[in-house]
Image: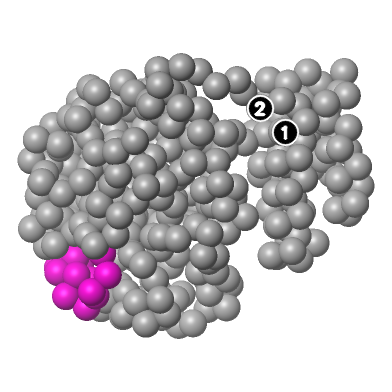
């Protein structure tokens, strides 16, 4: 597999776990890393909250040597705050920092952050200049095609990022207005590849090994970023690696492996966040883990109502016996 270079950092392969709020916390990142992801990104971290030393935000920064190198994704719209957040992260040992310019969530956009930045390229230039100047670690960016189809300014923003000294660009082939609906436009990723000399990760509608190969071949991007396609399916990374290396397909996980991964994920979440918070976090994952399995709707309804880790463990242990 081709390696990926982000500044001085060498990534073992060119498959990346996308930053996803509420999902790419430490337990899930570790599971994806073990399954073959070459690079993992944190959940979106508020630069404002980080600089104010918000305790809840600080917990998003927890990492483990097994997931190295972790890229911390920052969200914000003020250059001074983002600069200060980068300095704090570098001093705490972060290996790299990513600027979120793609989140379409109304709350984030209203604050002037996330995808709202795409409507203000001059501000993006100022922000990235400050972030890069403040750091000796790689600064990366994640963006969308544009705010909407009429203002698809991704090429302009890609050039701004590269000129400012960004080490990598991740491009999602949808506009902010699209959210996660419709189809991702891979042609914009192909066009971005033509104007960039730094590595480009393609993102959007990569849900299978064949998708990963098509993305790489069609766009010429350096690597593939997988988001929703890996939720409940961390094995997709090993399947993609095998397919890209050999052209062959690995069998999907058995019910026993699926069950053991669900159990391990639960145990890690409870250990990390406590039983109450860990159980609630995992409710987001259960439907993804068991979708398309026999009896999945009934099992999911039971799991999301359970309040004790032990009763969830017992239920999951019998997953392969669901009828």
Which residue is tagged 2?
A: 253
Residue annotated with mark 1: 257
Quadrant assignment for the N terminus? top left
The chosen color scheme is one colour
Which residue occupies 71% across, 57% down?
268
Compared across the picture, whether 172 is left or right of 46 comes to left
The percent position of residue 56, horizontal first and vertical second, equals 58, 72
- Residue 106 visible to an observer of this rendering: no
**Are dots 1 and 2 in contact, CB under 8 Å?**
yes
The residue lying toward the viewer, choosing from 159 and 139, is 139
The answer for how far apart the CA atoms under marks 1 and 2 are is 6 Å
User: Residue 217 occupies which quadrant of the picture?
Assistant: top left
Residue 161 colored in magenta in the image:
no
Q: Position of residue 42 (x, y in %)?
A: 46, 58
Q: Secondary structure at mark 2?
A: loop
Q: Which residues are magenta?
A: 123-140
Task: Answer above or below: position of 50 versus 282.
Answer: below
């Amino acid at each position: 597999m081709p390696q990926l270079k982000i500044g001085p950092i060498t990534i073992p392969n060119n498959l990346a776990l996308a930053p996803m709020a509420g999902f790419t916390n430490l337990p899930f990142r570790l599971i994806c890393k073990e399954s073959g992801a070459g690079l993992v990104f944190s959940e979106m971290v508020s630069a404002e909250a980080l600089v104010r030393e918000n305790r809840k935000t600080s917990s998003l920064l927890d990492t483990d040597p097994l997931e190295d190198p972790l890229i911390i994704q920052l969200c914000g719209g003020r250059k001074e705050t983002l600069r200060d957040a980068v300095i704090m992260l570098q001093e705490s040992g972060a290996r790299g920092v990513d600027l979120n310019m793609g989140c379409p969530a109304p709350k984030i956009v209203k604050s002037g952050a996330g995808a709202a930045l795409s409507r203000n390229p001059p501000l993006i230039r100022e922000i990235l200049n400050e972030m890069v100047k403040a750091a000796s670690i790689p600064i990366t960016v994640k963006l969308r095609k544009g705010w909407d189809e009429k203002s698809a300014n991704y090429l302009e923003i890609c050039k701004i990022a590269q000129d400012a000294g960004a080490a990598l660009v991740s491009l999602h082939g949808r506009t902010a207005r699209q959210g996660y609906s419709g189809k991702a436009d891979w042609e914009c990723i192909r066009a971005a590849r033509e104007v960039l000399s730094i590595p480009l990760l393609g993102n959007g509608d990569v849900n299978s090994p064949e998708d990963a190969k098509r993305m790489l071949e069609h766009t010429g991007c350096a690597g593939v970023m997988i988001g929703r396609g890996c939720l409940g399916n961390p094995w997709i990374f090993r399947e993609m690696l095998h397919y890209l290396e050999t052209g062959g397909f690995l069998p999907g996980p058995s019910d026993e492996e699926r069950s053991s991964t669900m159990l391990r994920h639960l145990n890690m979440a409870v250990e990390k966040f406590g039983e109450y918070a860990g159980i609630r976090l995992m409710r987001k994952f259960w439907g993804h883990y068991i979708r398309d399995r026999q009896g999945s709707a009934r099992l999911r309804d039971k799991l999301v109502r359970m309040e004790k880790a032990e009763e969830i463990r017992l239920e999951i242990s019998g997953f392969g016996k669901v009828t």
